[in-house]
Image (cartoon, grey):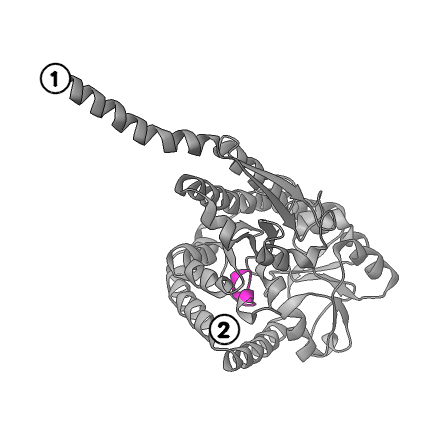
């Protein structure tokens, strides 16, 4: 065989060796199921920019259809609270929720959604993406066969709606309030009867006087529930959820089965929805807040300083107890708080000055 023919044959063989896996990769389709903690038509969480359905579309479009995802809202395939276990066991490949729903699995999960008196949207992103938070999150979830991703954020939430004005700590004693999670435990320390109600049950409970106050999310979503019709006082800023992150969890074996380019697509689609969802909230909340104040007689104001101080003290006590009980929570807590201390110093030179000196109405 002549040298030229040999070289030609070798080149043909090399091309074939390289091209074959590429053809296989292009033909491989991953058909996955995604469940959710939220209903199939829930605004922000299931529908709209940055929502779970938007995330599904972005992954499918960016992958050219190589990942196809069937979305199921809460109750359509499994109950809302079973998504964590369903992905952990491999029953479904993906679930959309908030990590603080899983504090019964690990208290450390609280830190990856929102910690009372914690980081804001910018600070949480800093800790997650560049401060070790995401690595810790994956370490915490690894024993559950889960790989978590940051995929949404409401930004700062509101303290909630109250039928009567809150002037002192005494006004909280005996108050019946819809408030979930760690914040509910904090309120209980101050004598509040904290209750967990589904979103659809909040309005009728507040209207009938079954509860005296309620927290949900923020102006746009709260207005959708009609809470402004049955409560006058709207307390700001949400000390309990200063930035509330959404999570996508993927079964660890399913994640490992994806080639590198599809993993990159999932990661980047999640990052896009994280930013886009919070931007949606900024625009819609600003418009809704203006409407609530101008057209519905809503009184928007912060809680008195003395009440906030008591809530902070109760929160610090609960976190200290959790840290003392669990070394995993201690590790996450120390990372989070160390980052927040540095961020607070920087924010004192940046964001705080912006809000006090630069930001103003035209």
Q: CA distance from mark 2 to mark 1?
A: 70 Å
Vertically, is 214 above or below 283?
below
Q: Residue furthest left?
A: 3
The structure residue drawn at horizontal position 56% and vertical position 67%, both measured from the top left corner, is 116
Report the side of 320 relative to 351 (left or right). Answer: right
Question: Local crowd at mark 2 within 10 Å, few (<14), some, or many (≥20)?
Answer: many
Report the side of 250 relative to 104 (left or right). Answer: left
Q: x, y (%) of residue 278? A: 55, 47
- What residue would you read off at disc 2? 329
Q: How many marks?
A: 2
Q: Quadrant of the N terminus?
A: top left
The structure residue drawn at horizontal position 54% and vertical position 65%, both measured from the top left corner, is 109
Residue stretch in magenta: 109-117
Q: Is residue 234 magenta?
A: no
Question: Local crowd at mark 1 within 10 Å, few (<14), some, or many (≥20)?
Answer: few
> Sequence-wise, which precedes: disc 2 or disc 1?
1
Q: Foreground: 293 or 342?
A: 342
Q: x, y (%) of residue 136? A: 44, 64
- What residue would you read off at disc 1? 2
The structure residue drawn at horizontal position 44% and vertical position 67%, both measured from the top left corner, is 336
Secondary structure, mark 1, is: loop
Q: Foreground: 304 or 122?
A: 122
């Amino acid at each position: 065989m002549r040298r030229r023919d040999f070289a030609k044959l070798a080149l043909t063989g090399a091309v074939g060796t390289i091209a074959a896996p590429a053809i296989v990769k292009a033909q491989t389709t991953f058909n996955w199921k995604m469940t959710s903690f939220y209903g199939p038509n829930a605004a922000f969480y299931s529908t709209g920019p940055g929502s779970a359905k938007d995330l599904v579309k972005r992954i499918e479009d960016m992958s050219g259809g190589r990942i196809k995802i069937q979305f199921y809202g809460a109750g359509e395939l499994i109950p809302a609270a079973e998504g964590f276990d369903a992905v952990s066991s491999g029953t479904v490949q993906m679930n959309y929720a908030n990590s603080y729903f899983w504090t019964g699995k690990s208290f450390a999960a609280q830190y990856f959604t929102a910690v009372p008196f914690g980081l804001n949207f910018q600070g949480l992103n800093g800790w997650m993406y560049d401060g070790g938070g995401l690595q810790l999150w994956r370490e915490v979830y690894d024993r559950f066969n889960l790989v978590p991703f940051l995929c949404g954020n409401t930004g700062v939430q509101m303290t909630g709606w109250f039928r009567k004005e809150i002037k002192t700590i005494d006004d909280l004693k005996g108050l019946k309030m819809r408030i979930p999670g760690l914040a509910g435990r904090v309120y209980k320390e101050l004598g509040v009867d904290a209750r967990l109600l589904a979103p659809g049950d909040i309005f009728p409970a507040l209207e009938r006087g079954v509860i005296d106050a309620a927290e949900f999310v923020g102006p746009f979503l709260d207005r959708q529930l009609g809470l402004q019709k049955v409560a006058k006082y709207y307390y700001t800023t949400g000390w309990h959820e200063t930035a509330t992150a959404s999570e996508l969890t993927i079964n660890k074996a399913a994640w490992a089965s994806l080639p590198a380019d599809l993993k990159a697509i999932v990661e980047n689609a999640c990052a896009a929805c994280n930013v886009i969802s919070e931007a949606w909230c900024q625009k819609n909340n600003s418009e809704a807040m203006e409407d609530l104040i101008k057209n519905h007689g809503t009184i928007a104001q912060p809680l008195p300083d003395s009440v906030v101080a008591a809530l902070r003290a109760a929160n610090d006590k609960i976190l200290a107890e959790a840290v003392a009980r669990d070394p995993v929570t201690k590790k996450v807590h120390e990372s989070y708080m160390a980052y927040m201390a540095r961020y607070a110093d920087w924010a004192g030179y940046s964001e705080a000055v912006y809000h006090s000196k630069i930001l103003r109405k035209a």
